[in-house]
Image (tube, grey):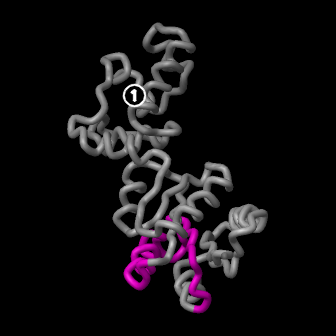
Amino acid sequence: MVATVLLVDDHELIRQGLRRAFERTDDFTVVAEAASVAEAVAAAKQHDPDVVVVDVRLPDGNGLDVARMLRSQNDDIGIVVLTMYAGDEQLFGALEAGASAFVAKDAPAEDVVSAARHAVVSPRSFSAADLAEAMRRRLTPSGPQLSPREREVLQLLADGLGVSAIARQLYISESTTKTHISKLYEKLGAANRAQALMSAMRLGLIKSAES
């Protein structure tokens, strides 16, 4: 059986890349594309796809609203949520919206196809690469345990300093600074500086941040 897919993203290049990834498979066919919430709603109504792959950020609204609406209308539809900012807040937002899977936009296109396969088989069973760690972080009210040095590095990152400047400020090597930053990212469940600062602000670890 070939499953039908609706792609929803306002960037044409991303839609093209995803379309090519799905077209390389034997079990999917892309029946429509949309670049906005309004187009997604119309296309879903017209084509009744088995799976909808939707970006969180759309020009006229939020992809999670699309997911929520589709789920309220159809228990069996597969919904894969894509996001550029794959933090815990977005992950749990997708879960609560009724999505079947959550994938970061910087993941390989094959990961999106794999998520779509999961969505076809288990549309109401949520899948995400970082789900177990995200649940652990949510269930740990005190948040990640940072060492005093890691807290210093985090605050300097929030102040806008780069690796070299932090190393000079703390009288440590750039290699040691990078190790501290890497551990911070791991503890905060972040893939980059912006995500780390957003997580730190959400957890109350810093008062202000510049990305």
With respect to residue 24, does 146 lie above or below? above
- Rendered location of residue 147, percent (x, y): 32, 19
Residue furthest left in the image: 141
Task: Write down the region rendered in magenta.
Answer: 46-75
What amino acid is at disc 1?
Leu
Q: Secondary structure at mark 1?
A: helix
Q: Reply yes or no: does residue 180 show up in magenta.
A: no
| Circle 1 residue | 154
Would residue 204 be found to the left or right of residue 28 on screen? left
Residue furthest front in the image: 1
Residue 153 in view in this figure: yes
Quadrant assignment for the N terminus: bottom right
Q: Reply yes or no: does residue 61 show up in magenta.
A: yes
- Point 62% across, 49% down: residue: 106
Residue furthest bottom in the image: 46
Residue 12 in view in this figure: no
- Point 70% across, 63% down: residue: 18
